[in-house]
Amino acid sequence: MDPGAISLHPVASISDLHWASAGYKGIEGNGPAPSSSRLHRAPRSPPHLPTLRPVPPPTICPCPGHPLFFILLGLLALASMILATLAIYLSVLQSQSVQALAQWLESQEDAMRQLRAASGQLWARLNASTQHH
């Protein structure tokens, strides 16, 4: 069997897992010792378990040492509101400008029609006066 291969063996208790993880082999020589064979081994010191650190109580503020974060967050929110207001204002201003431009163009078209009509009348008078002479 390959030394890096993983082999799974049934265990009867958690202490069998510890016994196998310490490198001891069972009676067959290829797995953890059965629970009954643990009586024949030499006594060992208890395994060293990792100590758990106490979890600090949750705080209301996620970052109490950094008020600058909240100041920057507030400035970002304020800048966003100002930009949104400015965008709405410019949109309304553009709409009003387009309406004013459309009215001006219509008035220019009316003026051009009136000038063409007056020009046509003047040409007609001029032609009529040259024919009589």
Image (cartoon, rainbow, N blue to C red):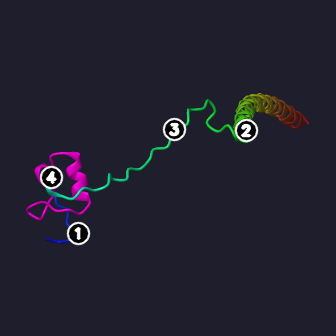
Between discs 2 and 4, the one toward the N terminus: 4
For the record, the magenta segment spans 11-38
At label 4, which amino acid type do we have? Leu
Residue 77 position in % (x across, y down): 70, 34
Q: Quadrant of residue 85?
A: top right
Residue 26 position in % (x across, y down): 13, 60
Residues 2 and 12: in front is: 12
Q: Is 82 displayed left or right of 61 in the figure?
A: right
Mark 3 lies on residue: 55
Residue 30 position in % (x across, y down): 12, 64
Q: Are marks 1 and 4 in contact (CB under 8 Å)?
A: no
Placement of 5 over or under 126, stated as above or below: below
Between discs 1 and 2, the one toward the N terminus: 1
Q: Which mark is residue 39?
A: 4
**Tag 1 secondary structure:** loop
At label 1, which amino acid type do we have? Gly
Q: Residue at x 38, y 50 (%)?
A: 49
Circle 1 packing at 10 Å, graded few (<14), some (14-19), many (20+), is few
Placement of 6 over or under 93, stated as above or below: below
Q: CA distance from mark 2 to mark 4?
A: 62 Å
Mark 2 lies on residue: 67
The mark closer to the camera, 1 or 2, is: 1
Magenta stretch holds residue 57: no
At label 2, which amino acid type do we have? Pro
Q: CA distance from mark 3 to mark 4?
A: 39 Å
Between discs 1 and 4, the one toward the N terminus: 1
Residue 1 position in % (x across, y down): 13, 71
